[in-house]
Structures are given as structure tokens and as C-alpha cells.
Image: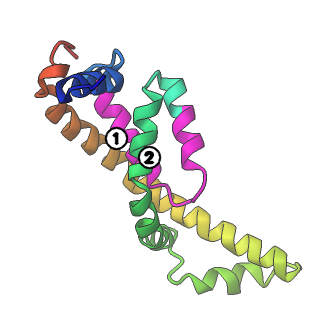
Amino acid sequence: MLVTRAELEQKAVVWLKQGLSPWQLALTLALGFTIGCLPVVGITTIICTIAALMLGLNLAVIQAANYAAMPFQLLLIVPFLKLGARVLALGSLSRVSTSTLNVLPATPVMRMTMHASSLAAQAMLGWVLVAVPAATALSLALHTALKRVPALKDSTR
């Protein structure tokens, strides 16, 4: 039995919406995309799952937005790292390893681990500074667009 395009579109809208208002759907997409840009590879799926469960959002939609953000995640690691370093007034990334890590009596593996952790913390700081305003702006823009979708107009929020 063949399914028509109209039936597929209707099923997709029902699946995507699953009782969500345009605002909740916009928030779900914005959070999924923003979390998906987190500069630590490998943890975004877990964080999106936790956020969806805690906030009562559509798990499939937040994960779809998360996966759509993966190319941006990789492209934004260095800019987030530089922003975090600038905010922490570190000047250059090499200063972290020479000033902080050479003081510590540690093995080379320990120093490398601490340096990687320091870089990850800098990148996370840069992400936090950008993520909150970006998620807010993205939510508002998506809400404005989703309010105009006829299939979503029956929700009033």
C-alpha cells in the first residue's frame, strides 16, 4: 500500500509536534542545536537526552537538532577556545602549559591530561558565553516561524 505525500507530511507533523506548542517545539530545536555545538565531542547526546527528559521536550526532535549541529560543533571548537582564553586573560594558549603545568611534579601523561582539561574548560567557557544568547535568539526566531505553520496553529502558546 502506497502512502501519499500528504499522509507523510501529516504523520511527520504529528510526530514532530507530539503535543508540543510552537514555543515548546522552538525551544526544543534551539536547545538541541545549541547543546549540539558544545565544544566537547561525545557528550552532547547524553546532555540533550537529560535536557529533554527534565524539561518534558520531544526527545527525537532535540536529538535531530543535536545531530544537525555536529558540523558546527567541530567548526566552533577553536573559536570557543580562543574566546575562553581571552575571557580568562590567558593571552596565548601555550602559556597554560608553560606557566601552570611546569610547576606541577607530574608525569608527561598527567601534564598532557591537565593541559587537555584546561583547554576543554576554556572552550566550555567560550561556549557558555555564546550559548545562552544564541539559544534565546534561536528560540525566538523559530517560534516566530513555527507560529505561521498551519499544522501547528491549533496550539495557542
Q: Secondary structure at mark 1?
A: helix
Q: Amino acid at mark 1?
A: Ala
Where residue 89 appears, x then y in whole percent?
50, 74
Q: Residue at x 39, y 61 (%)?
A: 72
Q: Which residue is mark 1?
A: 30
Mark 2 residue crowding within 10 angstroms, few (<14) / some (14–19) / many (20+): many
- Is 126 part of what is drawn in magenta? no
- Is 49 part of what is drawn in magenta? yes
Q: Image height check: is 147 above or below 33?
A: above
Mark 1 residue crowding within 10 angstroms, few (<14) / some (14–19) / many (20+): many
Which one is closest to the eye, mark 1 or mark 2? 2
Residue 114 left/right relative to 93: right
Give the extent of the magenta segment.
Answer: 23-50
Where residue 101 appears, x then y in whole percent?
75, 79
Q: Residue at x 27, y 44 (%)?
A: 138
* Spatial separation of the CA atoms under disc 1 and disc 2: 9 Å
Viewer-proximal residue, 13 or 85?
Answer: 13
Q: Amino acid at mark 2?
A: Asn
User: What number is the disc on residue 66?
Assistant: 2
